Amino acid sequence: MNFLANRIAVAIKNANSEDTYSIEIMQYSLNIILNTCFIILATALIGIVTGHFSESLIFLFSFSLLRLSSGGFHLKTATACNIVTIFLSTASPFLSIFSEQYFWFLSGISFLIIVVFAPNPDKNARIPLKIYPALKLISIILAGSNFLIHSSVVGLAFFVQSLTVIKQKKEVIT
């Protein structure tokens, strides 16, 4: 993706060098866009092949929506993020059959984790502290909404996402 993002950024810069950002900034932004498109496309294709198109996309959408407001830890590479996200999105329909039995438990745990730990934005996000209460409220409303929606796929998505907001204690070296 990085190679493709670079090629596109160079082409944009060559087409209009004065009214564009630096190649590095455009490449960074294009990387995010291309990786997101890749995740959506791969999830959709695998969902079609497995016969779980809508469930896979519902998981991906629900996971992403809660992640926007609650934050969470990031994997070390975009490739790892792509693989894990696609796997979770396409495996969830198979797991949601089992999670129906545990719907209230998973939804309750997810809700409690969000209440206690959200938001936990990435340190590079530059989100002002003054909007943290709004992010927390949005996260709580989203996590609580599944008690009304009562979807095992959404419940799994919220559960997995809630696990990513649990703050890890950093070791203090003395």
Image (cartoon, helix red, strand yellow):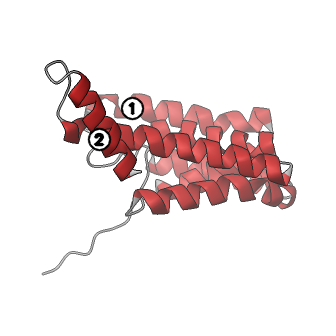
The residue identified by callout 1 is 133
Q: Earlier in the sequence, mark 2 or mark 1?
A: 2
Horizontal side of 150 relative to 62 (left or right) equals right
Image quadrant containing the C terminus: bottom left
Q: Secondary structure at mark 1?
A: helix
Q: Amino acid at mark 1?
A: Pro
Q: Which numbered tag is attached to residue 80?
A: none
Horizontal side of 165 relative to 43 (left or right) equals left
Above or below residue 149? Residue 73 is: below
In the image, 113 versus 31, the foreground residue is 31
Number of numbered tags placed on the structure image: 2
Horizontal side of 90 relative to 172 (left or right) equals right
Residue at figure coordinates x 56%, y 51% from the top left? 161
Residue at figure coordinates x 39%, y 46% from the top left? 4
Q: Amino acid at mark 2?
A: Gln
* Mark 1 Cα shell of 10 Å, populated few (<14), some (14-19), many (≥20): few
Q: Which numbered tag is attached to residue 27?
A: 2
